[in-house]
Amino acid sequence: MRPDVIVVGGGLMGCSVAYRLAKDGARVLVLERSVPGAEASSAAAGILGPSVESFEDALALQLGRRSRELHAELADELDELFGVDVGFRRCGVVELAFDEEEIAALDAQASTLRLHGVRCDRWSREELMEEEPAANSDALGALCIPEDAQVEPKKLLSAVALGAEHDGVTFQSGSTVRSVIVEGGRVRGVQLGDQVIEADRLVVAAGSWTTLIPGLPFDSETIFPVRGQMIATETRPPIFRRVVFGAGGYVVTRPDGRVLCGSTMERVGFQRGITFGGMADVIRKATRIAPGLRDAAIQEHWSSFRPGTPDGLPLVGETRIEGLFLASGHHRNGILLAPLTAELIAEAMAGKPGSRESEALSPKRFEEAQG
């Protein structure tokens, strides 16, 4: 049966969009060149921390907070429907300061967040050590944002894919899109080798590879790969109760004691792999945050590509080509913004008037810049 919508990309972004559109009654086909979640979705730490990541940008902060709350609703929904725990925990996020300059930056950050209605608490060194004893005692203070959260990306992806299939979405793995077919200014489908699949609407959610697909009206630098290297270990008892940022890195602790440490941000093209320099950087940052990790064994290490954009905001919405939508370019916030992105795509397809937020994320801003 001919699909109403083709979604290119089977990561969390593509699965979230497919799940949301299927709820509206659309027949959705998801095309994935590998297997769903093989790239950045499964490699991410799952931090839902817009108050740390995006506080300097009012729009990004607003979008992140809204999507964080959609995560809470989605977690309840998936648990109720399928009995799946996706690991959503409103554990809070802490940011450490190690010198007077960083203390001043935390004070400024706290003021900005409070102006936007974000609850946050400034801790002294003594309060930090009482709340998180494993934190580095060299820290002069900290900022705690209790509403921020975390989720387990692999569990979330599996549950969202399950929900999508339950609602009739078809997944086709091993499908590399060779080109987008456009006729008369509107999308007609995609070319897969010798096979053509037709559809009147197409959503490209292919992460860092998005603008490499022939037929899209963007150059290859509109969305570019940023490599991130990470390390996983385990501690008993769990080293932190909250997600902890500091020294340019972060430490994410799961309730069972698993610990994720990250992450580098490297513009090295599509060069995969783990490097001595990358691992040294992650280890230095993690042990600066939590000196006790020096004795922890490295259990896993990996790298993935985040899809960056020139202005730091994702490309979400319809392009100048009728029926062609993008849901990509989320950089470090792909997990965080997946539910909101799915909502925005669904609203755009339903013809709802664009909001200030959707206009700011429109892919057309780069089409116009490129003429």
Image (cartoon, rainbow, N blue to C red):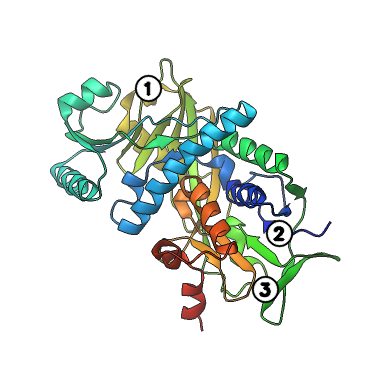
Side of 138 where 339 appears, left or right? right
> At 63% across and 74% down in the image, what residue appears?
322
> At 62% across and 75% down in the image, what residue appears?
321
Label 1 residue SS: loop
Residue 24 visible within the image: yes
Q: Which residue is tagged 2?
A: 6
Q: Give the mark nearer the N terminus: 1 vs 3.
A: 3
> At 57% across and 72% down in the image, what residue appears?
319
Q: Are marks 2 and 1 in contact (CB under 8 Å)?
A: no
Q: Amino acid at mark 2?
A: Ile
Q: Which residue is tagged 1?
A: 239
Label 3 residue SS: loop
Q: Position of residue 204 (x, y in %)?
A: 63, 61
- Above or below for 8 versus 36: below
Q: Amino acid at mark 1?
A: Ile
Q: Amino acid at mark 3?
A: Gly
Q: Give the mark nearer the N terminus: 2 vs 1.
A: 2
For mark 3, does the 10 Å Cα neighbourhood hold few (<14), some (14 to 19), or many (20 or more) residues? some
Foreground pick, 132 / 99: 132
Q: Which residue is tagged 3?
A: 215
Q: Quadrant of the N terminus?
A: bottom right
